[in-house]
Image (tube, grey):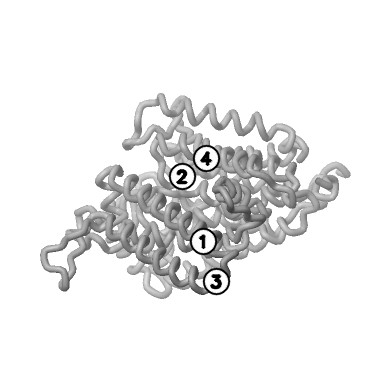
Amino acid sequence: MRQGEKLTSHLDWPLLIIYFLFLIMGMATVYSTSLNPEHPNLFDYSQKYGKQIVWLGVSLFLGLLVFLIDSSVYRKFAVPIYLFTLVLLVAVLFMPPINGARAWLQLGGFGIQPAEFAKTGTALLLARYISSLNIKQQNLNSVLVANAIMLVPMVLILLQPDAGTFVVFTSFLFVMYREGLTYDPLVLKIVNLIPGIKFKQTWVGTHFIPIMFAVVFLCIVTLLLSNNTLTFDFLPGVKIPGFFGVIISLLIFCLIAFFFLRFNSSKRDRRRITTVILLAFILSTSIASSVNYLFQNLAEHQKDRIELVLGISKKDEKNGKDYNRNRAMAAVGSGGLFGKGYTNASVATIESNHVPESETDFIFCPYAEEWGFVGTFILIVMYMIMFFRIIMIAERQRSRFNRVYAYSVVMILFYHLAVNIGMNIGFAPVIGIPLPFFSYGGSSMMSFSVLIFVLLKLDSQRSHVLQ
């Protein structure tokens, strides 16, 4: 009895309670979406809701297992766990493709998606590495190693290919920024290679968020103009490919900035200003070129989805290349203010097959159809409560390892929520990403549960760890 009391004495009950609420709501939505009137039993394992019950049970078992393990184990074995997930990511590349991707390992009658568990492995190793650094004395090696921890699984996931999980891994950039691990050492190393230029610091670290928005803006502009041709009324007959228009615009902007700043600064600063503008042009041109190259080499259906979101291509017939978004938005909109009621969805069900993958990537659709705007608003508020709770847990940690891991968890969950709902309401390309604790599937359910329970364990023993 005393051991049980000790085990749960520092357990964060609010987070655990909201986790169980999500499990119940998600299970209820899967049941409603895939209900077969001839097999209404929830524990009928021939149906998807019966299989989801199994996965839910396995997830809870794994959660209990990781919670019973001493928190120090996750720090000590972060490297083996990470390497094990990398081995799985390599092994899956030799598996037969399923739906055009080599993302699944078949174990008997079940399939496991290693990319889901690679998030946990990466979060643990990144937490261990960053916690071992002196952030005030960070150097180029620390930046490169931290980014390599993130990039290696990203490359393996891109080879599958799994665009959704690839995007989720970029969430670790914000975790590194939170801990002060910026790209300043890398920028300084490059700039100071130029003779006569010696910078002691850069503004990259302190302006990380604006720079990220600027990069996203540049990527979107490149995508908008990649397949277009620019014509000018005052230059008859002159046609410029859209991508080259981006490069020319960047060059003109940099030249204007160069002349303005060069003649409005002291002689001592002119060389530095010239260097910064030159590097800015090279960097922005490289980003634009990379985005253009990757876009041109995507599969046609992937290019179609991006173009549709950006408005480059117009929506076509209901069964055309935009049918995913059209049907998803129709299902969400059909719920109205208060919804049609539980099990009364008529658009977003497996039986109607109006919305493809309505029990997995598009499970937000049947939920929105059943509970309407009010229900979806409550759902999003619940997610926000979970996120803020995890942030509170992160900030009360005495151990940097615990804090980094907690921020990794909240960023992974936030990415999943934002992209999944964005897909369902037409704000994001359809890249295949599950809604946490809701979408049908064992790999995602188990990985999200492991993420949460490892966090609960680390937090329950936070007073025992000082580093």
User: Residue type at mark 4?
Assistant: Leu
For residue 262, side relative to residue 337 (left or right): right
- For the point 68% across and 50% down, the residue is 404
Q: Residues within 10 Å of mark 2 (few under 14, many from 20)?
A: many
Q: Which residue is mark 4?
A: 151
* Cβ atoms at labels 4 and 1 below 8 Å apart: no
Disc 1 residue type (three-letter): Ile
- Return the disc, 4 or 3, that comes first in the chain's sequence: 4
Image quadrant occupied by the N terminus: top right
Q: Residues within 10 Å of mark 3 (few under 14, many from 20)?
A: few
Disc 2 target residue: 166
Query: Residue 450: percent from the left, percent from the top?
Result: 62, 42
The image shows residue 403 at horizontal and vertical percentages of 71, 52
From mark 2 to mark 3, how far is it between C-alphas? 43 Å
Q: Earlier in the sequence, mark 3 or mark 1?
A: 1
The residue singled out by tag 3 in the image is 265
Residue at the left extreme, as displayed: 237
Q: Which residue is mark 1?
A: 211
Q: CA distance from mark 3 to mark 1?
A: 24 Å
Contact flag, marks 2 and 3 (Cβ < 8 Å): no
